[in-house]
Image (cartoon, helix red, strand yellow):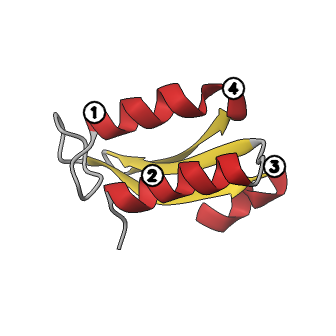
Amino acid sequence: MLSKQVLRDTFEKAKQENSKFVFVGIEAEGVQETICIPERSFDEKQAFYERSYTEDLVHVMNKNVFIRGLSYGGSEQLDIIA
């Protein structure tokens, strides 16, 4: 099950392995999307997700928006969370 700890771990592993991207799969009102975060934005985006999502990765202002998958790596990793 996804949690803020999994979110933190994903960003930390991406940094440790010098990954180019962190991928965040989001479902919003029934629409799925994948956000591709470049390494230069890891810290800022991690802080944003930690502020904006509950422990279970549901958006604090809209329960119909949630993180459904996390991954990191190069662009070839995009299919992992689709």
Quarter of the image containing the N terminus?
bottom left
Amino acid tagged 3: Ser
Distance from disc 4 to disc 2, alpha carbons, whole Å, reads 16 Å
Residue annotated with mark 3: 75
Q: Nearer the viewer, mark 3 or mark 1?
A: 1
Q: Secondary structure at mark 1?
A: helix
Mark positioned earlier in the residue sequence (3 or 1): 1
Query: What residue did someone put label 1 on?
Result: 51
- Give residue 2's position: percent from left, percent from top: 37, 66
Q: Residue furthest bottom?
A: 1
Q: Estimate how packed mark 4 is, as few (under 14), some (14 to 19) or many (20 or more) residues with alpha carbons within 10 Å.
A: few
- Give the mark nearest the N terminus, 1 or 2: 2
Which one is closest to the eye, mark 3 or mark 4?
A: 4
Q: Is residue 56 left or right of residue 23?
A: left
Image point (70%, 33%), residue name = 38
Tell me, yes or no, whether the two marked residues, 4 and 2, touch with CB atoms within 8 Å. Answer: no
Disc 3 to disc 1, how far (Cα)?
27 Å
Question: In the picture provided, is 74 more to the left or to the right than 71?
Answer: right
Disc 3 on helix, strand or loop? helix
Residue 34 % position (x, y): 57, 46
Q: Which residue is mark 4?
A: 40
Label at residue 4: none
Q: Quadrant of residue 21?
A: top right
Say if mark 3 contacts mark 1, CB within 8 Å: no
Q: Quadrant of residue 71?
A: bottom right
Which residue occupies the extreme front position in the image?
Answer: 16
Q: Amino acid at mark 1?
A: Arg
Q: Earlier in the sequence, mark 3 or mark 4?
A: 4
Gap between marks 1 and 2 measured at Cα? 12 Å
Lower sequence index among marks 1 and 4: 4
Q: Is residue 82 visible?
A: no
